[in-house]
Image (cartoon, rainbow, N blue to C red):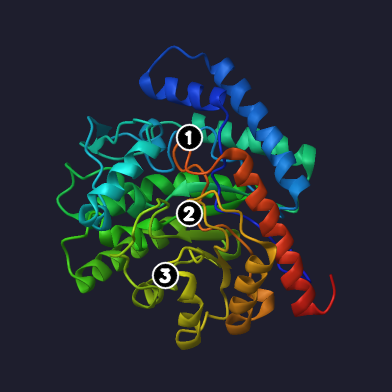
Amino acid sequence: MAYARIPTTHVGSLPRSDMVSDVVAAEERGSPVTDELFDAVIAEAVDADVERQKRIGIDIVSDGEFSKLTYASYIQHRLTGFSGDSPLVSPADLDEFPGAAEQTRRRRAQKFQRPMCTGPVTMRTRAPLDGDIRRMRAATEKHTPAGAFLTAASPGLIAIFHPNRHYPTHMAYLEALANAMRVEYRAIVEAGFDLQVDCPDLAMGRHTIFKHASDSAFLNHAEEQVEALNHALAGLPPERVRIYVSWGNYEGPHTHDIALAKILPVIFKVRARTLLIEAATPTHEHDWRVFKDQPLPDDKVLAPGVIDVTNNYVEHPEVVADRLERYASVVGRERVIASTDSGFAAFAGDRMVDPKVAFRKLESLVAGARIASARLWGSA
């Protein structure tokens, strides 16, 4: 859809109600939650939040990722080959600042398993995916937003959270994940939604599972991850695909984040039209300048994050507008979409941002996009 203004979206996850968090967590624990109850709770929440997103003024809406406990570990219910548990690899910046690490742990109290890959990875069942599609279709047909997307984990993201204990090489693991996940990717696009592939592995991976490697070694791994992802995306129209890249949606020092300038050439290789990239945190607000030296390819659109999802400050609309105008000045006003840095609740039960504050932040996103549009197009 062509806009004569800056359109708005977000990265996907939205704050869950206690009931949504409870039924998803119960499913994770293997507690008896009937399919009917699970579907009824999630469907009602998706319907309400699609309506709320449209009412606020979000153009391209999501299902809030309500059916998923996390944006990566959900795959254990859809793919074969995963069992057991593994510890979460701590980011290098939190290793350096243990006091900050403890604060982060207290804020993110939800416990969940991170099973390892212990066998061949294949699609186990489409039922959870089909449920996501069915619920989102019902909500969008009822509320008719301008656009809608569903999220899915990239092969590289899955590899970060679920260590390989089966395949002989990291690349072999990625190839298996790509072949399995392409079913999900294709189903989302064929259902009429845009596909957002979550790829924080292309940035956050540097200071997590590759924190003891060199930049060059990490970039070689990133190239492999993009190669696997492009294999999974083969045959899908790039204009229907968006990818999300960030250094991790946690409130930490981020003193070990790899520079955007180093990873951007790799990101540009993904077969996706829209790039959602973290840009509002104090560590990365200056990154708009990188696009002066590394121009956005002609076939790409940029959705910079102009709202920080790790704190309860509500960005003033003028601040949002300033951020958007800076990006428009280097990539062109028609190729900017206003977005958030990350999801507001990458893990069910997240409380980094109060739910009411989260939606006020989205309201500010919309207001800031209107201000920037008025300045850039000369009309409201």
What residue occupies the far front of the structure in this picture?
A: 99
For label 1, the residue is 68
For label 2, the residue is 197
Please tell me how crowded label 2 is: few (under 14), some (14-19), or many (20+) other residues with Cα within 10 Å: many
Please tell me how crowded label 1 is: few (under 14), some (14-19), or many (20+) other residues with Cα within 10 Å: many
| x then y, percent, for residue 312 | 54, 48
The kind of secondary structure element at disc 2 is strand
- The answer, for residue 236, to whether it is visible in the render is no
Judge by depth and name the residue closer to the eye, 167 or 165: 165
Tell me the residue at 17%/65% (across/down).
Answer: 213
| x then y, percent, for residue 199 | 41, 57
Judge by depth and name the residue closer to the eye, 287 or 135: 287
Earlier sequence position, callout 2 versus callout 1: 1
The kind of secondary structure element at disc 1 is loop
What residue occupies the far right of the structure in this picture?
A: 379
Amino acid type, label 1: Lys
Mark 2 or 1: the one toward you? 1
Judge by depth and name the residue closer to the eye, 276 or 317: 317
Vertically, is 303 above or below 288? above
Q: CA distance from mark 3 to mark 1?
A: 26 Å
For label 3, the residue is 267
Vertically, is 186 above or below 171? above
